Image: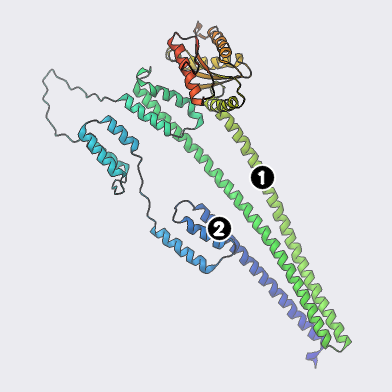
Amino acid sequence: MGFFNRSDNEDFGEQWRKKYLNLFDEQNKIEHTHREKERLLRQFIIQLSLLNESHDKQLDPILQRVRLHVKNEVDPQSLKVELKTFTDSVKNITPPKKTLNIGLLFEFLLHQYTDSPQQTALRELQKLVSSEANTIEQSSELFLEILKIIEPEKPETAVVLSADESIVEPVVLIDVNAVSEQLLAYFNVLAIPAIFEPETALITEALLNPNQSTKPFNEILSESVQYLVKIKEFCDAEQNDIDPFLLHIATQLSELNTMVSQISTLLEDSAKNRNQLDYAVFTQIRNLQITAIKITSLDALKDKVNQCFKTIASDIKIHHQHEKEQHALLQDLTAELFNKMISLELESENLKAELTVTHTQSMLDTLTGLPNRNAYNQRIKDELARYKRYQMPLSLAILDIDYFKSINDTLGYKFGDRVLMLTASVLQEYKRDTDFIARFSGEKFVMVLPNTTQDVALILIDELREIMANTGFNSNGKGVPVTISCGLTDVTEDDTEDSVFERANQALCEAKNTGRNRCCNLTQNEK
């Protein structure tokens, strides 16, 4: 009968109850670990699919479907089908052929080589390169084919020279205008950073009139090539700066996403544990009610009630401890998330400040400190919109330093830079506060005069011209006369940014053609 002793039975039941609770806790931990691994795997698959999106149009729909499958719950069978489709699609993808932008090249060649056989051969080659049946995949092959057309092999011939004859090197003639046109066309389609716009204007001006430039054409061509290399190096450097920054931002956002997911999981687990506790207490009470109906002994009922309450108290204690641990972990994650968000906010403020500085620098001319061409483009656009809304008078003036190229050639570029800086300083000092002045390009400045009629603008600009003519410029103790020519016009209802600038520029050309160091105006009717 000792086996049925009450004390032994209670110890035996308590051991099994503890063993059950321990196994239950281990099972919960295993399920939690499994859910966490599954969540991280889903997150990894989603991020991986986003990184590979837009690489191939055939794969994008498959990647989107994969993301839909793993976004909430993983369906192994559906995911297996999609992954097989993805694998088959990757195997069937054929790398695209590299295409060559040959339109500009053949336009130049057809303009340069006018012989009928060469023209015919070049057009046939252009059709072949542009067709779907193109067999030329590399630029080297294309240039070899072009070389065969423009420089066909000639049979070797013996040249007999007399004693008084000498070999004369062949002279290669270059069509300067054709090369300049092609370079200008290239500059027009090239995305040039704002910082290079002043230098672009100088090179463009030299290419527009290569035969009238003081520099030989080979020097202009060399400067153009060096300038393009400089732009490429600048863009590469900017890209190298942007890529690590974007990677850093992506990493930070991924960490934030992970923290938010962990907090969400903890809250879900806490809710599940409370539901499990409620269910366990409900089950204990229900079993106690059923047992109470069957038990006839008051002592047995008392023992059963005590055992039930003891079990419930134990479950509540375990749940409370688990809740306490989860609450501490939740506090740590929340604090870490808060600190991470503060860090991102500080980085965002620093980036905003840097972008503000960069924007300001992009609107200023580095040599003179005046607003540059970008700033002028924005200002004239705003002033034209204001003019068309309120019909207040608006004038535009273009000022150009006379014989500036001669100053550079005779006194050097450093003195030329001094002239530009002093001219900018004088114009900035003596203009009205409401006027806007910018360095447009080279030795050319533009001035926007709001609420100013053309007659009043002519008086103001002519005063600036006289001040410049009376300003002393010295080089090695010798005075250097520096004057400016001015062209101005007023804005009309039908004007655009280009039309009003073109009219002011025509007035400037008139001032230069009629003796320089003077101001001329041009109205819409006189154009």
Give the number of callouts.
2
Q: Which image quadrant is residue 123 in?
A: top left
Could one spot residue 377 in this view of the protein?
yes
Residue 416 position within the rendered picture, expressed as x and y whole percent measured from the top left: 48, 16
Could one spot residue 443 in this view of the protein?
no
Q: Residue at x 52, y 61 (%)?
A: 66
Per the rendering, the mark at residue 202 is none
Whether 270 is drawn above or below 461: the answer is below
Residue pointed to by mark 2: 44
Front-most of residues 142 and 381 = 381
Q: Residue at x 70, y 49 (%)?
A: 338
Front-most of residues 338 and 142 = 142
Residue pointed to by mark 1: 343
- Helix, strand or loop under label 1: helix
Q: Label 2 is placed on what type of residue?
A: Phe
- Helix, strand or loop under label 2: helix
Alpha carbon of mark 1 to alpha carbon of mark 2: how far? 24 Å
Q: Is residue 222 left or right of residue 21?
A: left
Question: Residue lying furthest bottom in this view?
Answer: 1
Q: Label 1 is placed on what type of residue?
A: Ser
Dividing the image into 4 quarters, which one contains the N terminus? bottom right
Q: Decide: few, some or many residues near mark 2? Use Cα within 10 Å; few <14, some 14-19, many ≥20.
A: some
Residue 50 position within the rendered picture, expressed as x and y whole percent measured from the top left: 52, 53
Residue 232 position within the rendered picture, expressed as x and y whole percent measured from the top left: 44, 35
